[in-house]
Amino acid sequence: MPSFRNTTSAMLMALISFSTIAYAEGEKLVEIKTQGNRRIESAAILNVIKMHAGDTLSDDKTDADIRAIYKLGHFQDVQVLKEESDKGIVLVYSVQEKPIVREISFEGNKEITTEKLKEALEFRLNSVFSTKDLAKSVTKLKKMYGDEGYYLADVQTEVKKGSTSDLSVVVKIIEGDKILIKDIRFDGNKAFSNRKLLGVMETKEKWFLSWLTGAGTYKEEVLKNDAMLITDHYLNNGYVNIKVGEPAVTLNETKTALDVHIVINEGEQYRIGAIGFKGELLEPETVLRNKLKSEQGEIFNRSILRTDIGTLTDVYGDKGYAFATINPQTRPDNEKKIIDLTFDVDKGELVYIERINIAGNPKTRDKVVRRELRVSETELYSAGGLKRSKQNLMNLGFFEEANIATAKGSAGNKLNVNVDVKEKPTGSFSIGGGYSSLDGPIAQGSIQQTNFLGLGLKANLSASIGKISQTYSLGLTDPYFMDTKWTLGGDIYRSERMYYDYVRRVTGADIKGGYPINDFISAFIMYKYEIKELYNPSTAYQQLHDADTNNIYPLDKTTTSSILSSITHNNTDYRLDPSSGMINSFSAEYAGLGGNNKYARFIADNNYFYPLYKKLIASTKLTLGYIANVGAQIPIDEKFYLGGISLCGYKLRTVSPYAITQLRDVNANQANQIVFLGGEKEIAGNFELTFPLIPDVSIKGALFFDYGNSFDDASMAFQSMLMSYGFGIRWASPIGPLRLEYGFPLNPRYGVDSTSGRFEFSIGTMF
């Protein structure tokens, strides 16, 4: 911006010039030109002025021209001059351009990198210099250092002129010592201890791990918000007259730490008195009251009151009253220390959905989005339908974000629904691996596309190649076959795996279908045909096979023709990463529609998720399985085996009934060898806690307790139950989901399990 003195001098010179021009009646301009401009083209200046060749000189127009040129923002001084030529009067706008910042340098910064400091500047290299922007930059840099704990950091600047139009800026920083909050002191708190209030706050006192956690760092905005958090805590515990003073921050006498002082005036605690309703009620008061969380006699809680307002708003919103207002009227009784609540309802008029607009989906077809919506054009507005629509869209796994908002329609009783999604990569290339003393290294990979062709089709091509296993599969599933609610898909696959007792090779194909009964319950059916071979048996298994007159341990090729059906109930909040809700499923498979193998298998699963505190999520899982023969012996490889992922800490497929055979080596020494036979029944489950470790990068920690057993005799189910515990890390890394698990067996089996536990991991990447 030009200085006041420069502006005044320019205006004064213009006035002096025009005092002469004013007496030159009839004189007209023959030319207008500029001088002094180097970077800015003359055309850009002449384009904003009002004077033109052929005009008569005018004080008002030249004054306006000077202001217009200043507004361009490129000049620190503008003057107007009159020159005489042979042809007539020439008007010259003489400008002085603002200097350009050609160099920015920092001195003295050690704790914050130069790159981060440059990002905080209000000006950039090769930009027009502004003292105002320089002052703003100094303020931001000081705040940046303050947020890192360098409360006394000083920022000084030096502007060095190069040429008449260039300059360099030197930023000198005196960081000083890091100063953290040593003590947070409260005055006036009686209902809650200092420790409790500290737990409510985001700001923490410094401790010996502050260098790692950042505790003790003073941030002005955060501390002010902490006062609001304390206020909310009191209001949610009945202290309706709470007053929390603004935190006072002082530097201690030695200037080595900060002290924070917060004054609190609690007032009295209030409980809820009578609860009533008035206004336009669509349901009886008793029905509405049963929907509320607030109860008479309970401590008043503002947070619960807000929830109740939302609940009642949704009740009316689900009936089409989009603009219903719920006004809670509170009447405190200071003597009885109670607050009577009356919910005053104004339902407004019925509202209809006029149009549904979808944006942000260049890859995904509109119909893929629309079929997940639970509101329709021309139908009544539904608050619950909008919430469910968002949940359905997120459960697809196609979008990072799915925002649904309403806007005014063509009439007062009509709304448009705007669905704005942000697509994410839906194709994945994943690799996984593990290592154990028995299996050695294992590697696997897969290519999947959950939104194939933007139609929501699920396609996968996977391969797993390792020392002991090879698997190949190709599949395609349409979750809305021919735009109906039916799911239809199929797979072809081939797998070969070396188990402890034999090698199992399977080549097969399946066709599957499903149907959603509602948003929470779905049915599924699948037919599969497999050609299977068990070969390369261990010596112990071969010995059992040779002694088997009923072909219980086959080594020839067999075929399986089976049909499987299942029903699943899933009401979790987010199916890709649930934090609340339940998943229940029951499946039944019958093999015997032709083929050699015959059996009936039943499996029931229950998963339950519950948020304990903020993002600390508890979950439980229980699986019950049963397989029965149907006119023939159950194939050994179709029975139940636990271990590995299903029972951490124990080797894969080793938790089952077993047989011990006696072998002799070349020296006639006798040794026992175990053959794992599989069980006809299984129980497996776990308890797990997941919590954020580093939320900014989506790293979670997990603590788990697993238990399980596979058995034939039901009386042995709990006598030999195996249990383990351990920890894990889950990370949505830039190269895909990463999972690390380590389990310790509580009752390891001699000669089978390691008492030191087992480690497993998997990792993937997105494209």
Image (tube, helix red, strand yellow):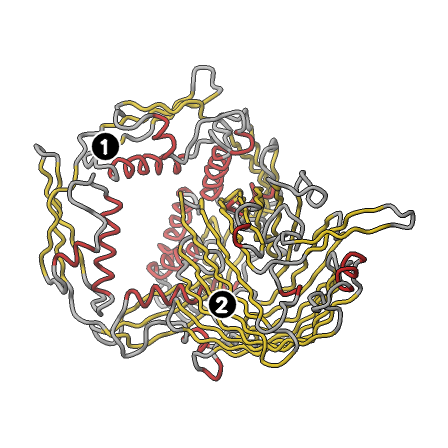
Of residue 64 and residue 188, the one placed in the foreground of this image is: 188
Report whether residue 599 is seen.
yes
- Identify the secondary structure beneath mark 2: strand
Q: Which mark is residue 243?
A: 1
Of residue 265 and residue 508, the one placed in the foreground of this image is: 508
Residue appearing at x 48%, y 70% in the figure: 566
Query: Three-letter amino acid code at disc 1?
Result: Lys
Q: Which mark is residue 587?
A: 2
Q: How far from the left and from the top, in percent, is residue 217?
A: 47, 31
Residue appearing at x 66%, y 77% in the figure: 596
Tell me the quarter of the image containing the C terminus: bottom right
Q: How far from the left and from the top, in percent, is residue 160?
A: 59, 38
Q: Looking at the image, is mark 1 or mark 2 nearer the viewer?
A: 2
Instruction: Classify mark 2: residues with Cα within 10 Å, few (<14), some (14-19) or many (20+).
Output: some
Image side of residue 169 versus residue 549, left or right:
left
Instruction: Report the number of discs.
Output: 2
In space, the residues marked 1 and 2 are separated at their CA atoms by 58 Å
Q: How far from the left and from the top, in percent, is residue 590?
A: 55, 73
- Identify the secondary structure beneath mark 1: strand
Q: Is residue 497 above or below residue 307?
A: below
Mark 1 vs 2: CB contact within 8 A: no
Query: Three-letter amino acid code at disc 2?
Result: Ser
